[in-house]
Amino acid sequence: MEQHQVTGKILVNDKWVTEVTNVPVFNDLATLCFRHKEVTNYLRQVSTISNDLIGTKTKQYRLVRDGKTFKDIVIPYITTNQPESIMEFLSKHPMVILKPSRGMRGEHIYKVTVLDDGHYHLIHETNEETLTHDEIFQFLYGLVSKKKYICQKYIETVDENGKPFDVRIRLEKNVYGKWETVVNLVRIAGKQKIVSNVAQGGYVAELSSFLQVNYPENWKAIEKKIIQIGDGLPGHIEELTGKNLSSLGIDVGIDPNGNTYLFEINTSPGTEFAIGEIALIKSGYYYYKMNEINNANKKTQSM
């Protein structure tokens, strides 16, 4: 930071070569980089960065709900560190999902169901158990007293084989500086009983064929809704937050009736699927940003 230079590797004739160069005028940052506040604050000052933080899952849900355009896809939820609040929520919604407000990669997610006999069914990863009222309260106390959790109404999103799934809408900004859907993929759970995150096992399917098999009567309407979310929600999020983004992964669930629900908005999605397409679109956006920055610099110098 003192010398305004960066050390890195570039590919030359199929070999990685270490080089030292001036800090680029545009830097594509994954949101994990924001943990290093000193460095990211420095990059904000000397360059343009690709992404910014849009807050926790709770803030995401609140933004979309209050923005109204897509409020119909927000699932009823509360955010709390009080077990009493979760028990009250369970009295209204007898099947819920618990997940950390700042969780990642589908970890530490629980499903709680109120049974007819007053007991509670708890699922975590591949484990299941039945608890009494006192036992579930003690479990919740130990869980949420350490960190805030989102308690969300459970939306049954399972395929014809009973496996949990979700739809990942993978987006990048393109050579015109506009959002473009790279791919719509269905992620299907392996051994997991709650989440469909393929980082913990599972597989993927192409959206249209999956919908035709699992929702034969209304698959076209569902696909149209998912496309509408991909087309409209990214710009809506930028407008609501006042922040510029360049990559998004929007996770959507579909209930047995074909209704779509927002699970999560990821500002640092992976590239494990469609990596070639992502690379092409990203390079186009870099070209767009370089031109935008150079033109702005020329205007400043001529003033």
Image (cartoon, grey):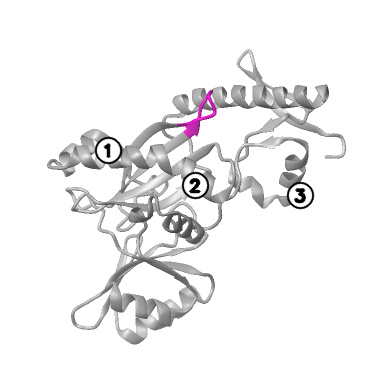
**Which element carries disc 1, helix, strand or loop?**
helix
| Quadrant assignment, res 193 | bottom left
**What residue is pinned by disc 1?**
224
**Amino acid at circle 1:** Lys
- Categorize mark 2 by other alpha carbons within 10 Å: few (<14), some (14-19), many (20+): some
> Earlier along the polypeptide chain: callout 2 or callout 3?
3
Whether 159 is drawn above or below 93: the answer is above
Q: Is residue 9 left or right of residue 68?
A: right
**Amino acid at circle 3:** Glu
Residues rendered magenta in the picture:
172-179
Q: Residue at x 33, y 37 (%)?
A: 227
**What residue is pinned by disc 2?**
237
> Earlier along the polypeptide chain: callout 1 or callout 2?
1
**In magenta segment, residue 177:** yes
Q: Is residue 54 left or right of residue 26?
A: left
- Categorize mark 1 by other alpha carbons within 10 Å: few (<14), some (14-19), many (20+): few
The image position of residue 208, as x and y in percent, is 24, 34
The image position of residue 123, as x and y in percent, is 32, 66
**Which element carries disc 2, helix, strand or loop?**
helix
Q: Residue at x 25, y 51 (%)?
A: 259
- Categorize mark 3 by other alpha carbons within 10 Å: few (<14), some (14-19), many (20+): few
**What residue is pinned by disc 3?**
38
**Which element carries disc 3, helix, strand or loop?**
helix
- Label 3, label 1: how many angstroms apart (C-alpha)? 43 Å
**In magenta segment, residue 192:** no
- Label 1, label 2: how many angstroms apart (C-alpha)? 20 Å
